Amino acid sequence: MNKYRFLTFCLLAVSLLGIACGGGGDEAAAPTAAAAPAAATGSGAITGVINYANGDPDTAIGMDADPVCVGLHAEGAVTEQVVGDEGRLGNVFVYIKSGLSGSFPASADKVVLDQQGCMYNPHVSGVQVGQPVVIRNSDPTLHNVHALPTANAEFNKGQPFQNMEFEHKFDTAEVMVRFKCDVHPWMNSYMGVVSHPFFAVSGTDGSYSIENVPAGTYTVEAWHETLGTQTMEVTVADDAAAAASFDFASAG
Amino acid sequence: MEPTSTHHRGLHRFAIVLVCCVILLISAGALVTSTESGLSVPDWPLSYGSLNPPSWWTISTVRAEHGHRLIAGTVATLTVILAVWIGVRENRRWVRRLAYLAVATVLSQALLGGLTVLFFLPTPVSVAHASLAEVFLCLTVTLAVVTSRWWRRAEGEPATVPGARRLFDVARVTTGLVFFQIFLGAVMRHSGAGLAIPDFPLVFGGLIPPAFDFPIAIHYSHRLGALAVTAAVVVTLVRALRLPSAAAGLRAVAVGLATLVAIQISLGAAVVLTGKAVVPNTAHVATGATILATSLLLTLGSWRSARAAVPSSAGAVRDPAFEGTGAQSASRATAQPNPSGGG
Ligand SMILES: [Cu+2]
């Protein structure tokens, strides 16, 4: 008798513990970061290229877990860590890490994170705190969208059908938020969530450009999925582009 | 008090089928963790908002997770059917209660499974899910054993099997150790420590890890646990083999137990040496559950064989006494790893 009661109690306690630990909940009513008076953008810019001399480490992706995905890549798929041409590195997230004053209202433009060919498009992107992110499934198969932030709330949502989409806003700046699909373990995407609009992602030619930067001196950080981060002091003047190129080859 | 043997035979067989389904279910759960498919279906209790998500059978990760849910639903249904059947047919109150407890356990287990999905696999919830699965298995094994004709044999039962009591004394310790060992394995598995010690049979080239952090400590504990279980099983086997030929059944179960442990250690080695390949990683959990079921079978069997000892208290006296100690002993063996004296 007592044993049964004890066991029942334990079951109950474990269940409650799970609820309590996991709590915290979902979305959270997003307080957009626009409390302080909005600071003006400027007429300067930060531009540069990302260099990488060690060759392209991208590898083929085996998509055997889902025959639909295999069918979407007649010539096979490769990873997108490095998509650089001639020693240039793409998919590097470059942003002003510090030095800005004031706050910047979130853009209302929607950032799209698409699932296409069982890969995320784009692989690396940026968004402002409070700016809407539209997550879409363009594939004729199902995906789960699993965001793994540390400062924001984790979520995991299913998109079983083609052309489904939902919108999400992040509450807190966080570089980077990783997205993964647990259905297709190779699917990864990284989104830089920042409190201002001064960020960019390098293209396949390694170049990037951050526009409308107010004059001032900033710490600029460049982030790469596997090669880590580098920072640089950059002084921006009005109506001019300050150069800030990063060399990841030496970062080893 | 008089069991109607035809009905009991069907019920007993149904309980055995349930035990097999539970081991299958645990194996399916192991496949989910081995393939890291636990979050490939993000919602619960539905799967992608429906009972069966589109193309679930063709996508390996979704097949693992959703398949686990379907088998779990089947097992829960079978458990309810068994409990109703026992509720109607069974005249021993403690057996009826055990069956109801099994229903409560399988429902709690489903809830834990849902919680671990909805909260992104927190280690304590996943470990509780893995551990409660083994408790549930023990409950179903117990139901299958105590509904057997052998357990309920009435008149003309043989005299006490000499040595059965001594076998029971060690078998129950073995069962407790096996349960604890599976618990350690679950903690290791769900905290991602399965490869924390990369070599086998040595440990970083020696016998003791040069440094300890949590993953190494839990992994090392699981290996020490394997040694303890092996030692207990060897003693169990020796005592079982000393039983008279009348107890050939118990001896065979003990030989099976020892064989399973040998297989299990090989599988554990394979998990480490293959870097957690899916097949050995899943088979290791399946075999662990089978070892627990076998050890519990031996424990209950030896207890029953030792109790047959009291021919003087046959008939009217036996059954009530049986109700008292039997219920306690069974729950002790299933729910707690450290059984103390029983009967
Ligand atoms: Cu996917």
Image (tube, grey):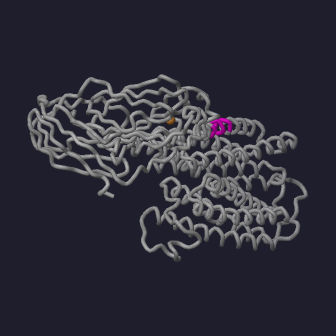
Which range of residues does the magenta coloring cover? B67-74
For the question of whether residue B309 can be seen, the reply is no
Q: Position of residue A155 (x, y in %)?
A: 41, 36
Residue A46, magenta (yes or no)? no
Residue B332 location, quadrant? bottom right
> What residue lies at 46% left-to-right and 42% top-to-bottom?
B120
Give whichever of A250, B201 is nearer the camera. Answer: A250
Total numbered circles: 0
For the question of whether residue B170 can be seen, the reply is yes
Asked if A71 appears above or below B280 in the picture, the reply is: above
Main SS of the magenta part reads: helix
Residue A67 location, quadrant? top right
Q: Position of residue B40 (x, y in %)?
A: 53, 38
Q: Position of residue B89 (x, y in %)?
A: 78, 38
> What residue lies at 55% left-to-right and 29% top-to-bottom?
A141
Q: Position of residue B263 (x, y in %)?
A: 70, 63
